[in-house]
Amino acid sequence: MTPPRTDRPDRKRVILYLPENELHELGLALFCLRSGKAGHEEVLPRQSTPFNALADVADRWHADIIITGALTDFHRGGRRIISQG
């Protein structure tokens, strides 16, 4: 288990997560470059990491930020879910 940081409190721990069956990584690679340039620590789990494993990584690594992206068309109860933001 990774202990909490004490050296630089302004330095964030960022998880860049790609959901299962999402095969695009370019956007996350750009975020990885930007966060590294800003001095943050980042971890990029393997492609198609199950969602429940993400929570475990976040808890063990004491993540401050989780960045994700999805292009999959999700449906719930016959309705299309659209995220704005």
Image: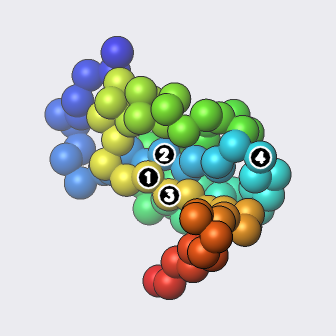
Depth-wise, is mark 4 or mark 3 nearer the camera? 4
The mark found on residue 21 in the picture is 4
The mark found on residue 66 in the picture is 1
Report how far apart the C-alphas of labels 4 and 2 lie in the structure: 18 Å
Q: Looking at the image, tell me whether mark 4 or mark 2 is earlier in sequence order.
A: 2
* SS of the residue under disc 2: strand
Depth-wise, is mark 4 or mark 2 nearer the camera? 4
Residue 46 x %, y %: 69, 34
Can residue 30 be seen from the camera position used here? no
- Lateral position of residue 46 relative to residue 2, left or right: right
Q: Looking at the image, tell me whether mark 2 or mark 1 is earlier in sequence order.
A: 2
Report how far apart the C-alphas of labels 2 and 1 lie in the structure: 5 Å
| Quarter of the figure with residue 49 | top right
Q: Amino acid at mark 3?
A: Ile
What residue is shown at x 23% (from left), y 30% (from top)? Answer: 4
Label 4 CA crowd tier, 10 Å (few <14, some 14–19, many 20+): few
Q: Which of 36 and 22 lies nearest the eye of the viewer?
A: 22
Report how far apart the C-alphas of labels 4 and 3 lie in the structure: 17 Å
User: Can you say whether 84 is above or below 17 in the image?
Assistant: below
Report how far apart the C-alphas of labels 1 and 4 lie in the structure: 18 Å
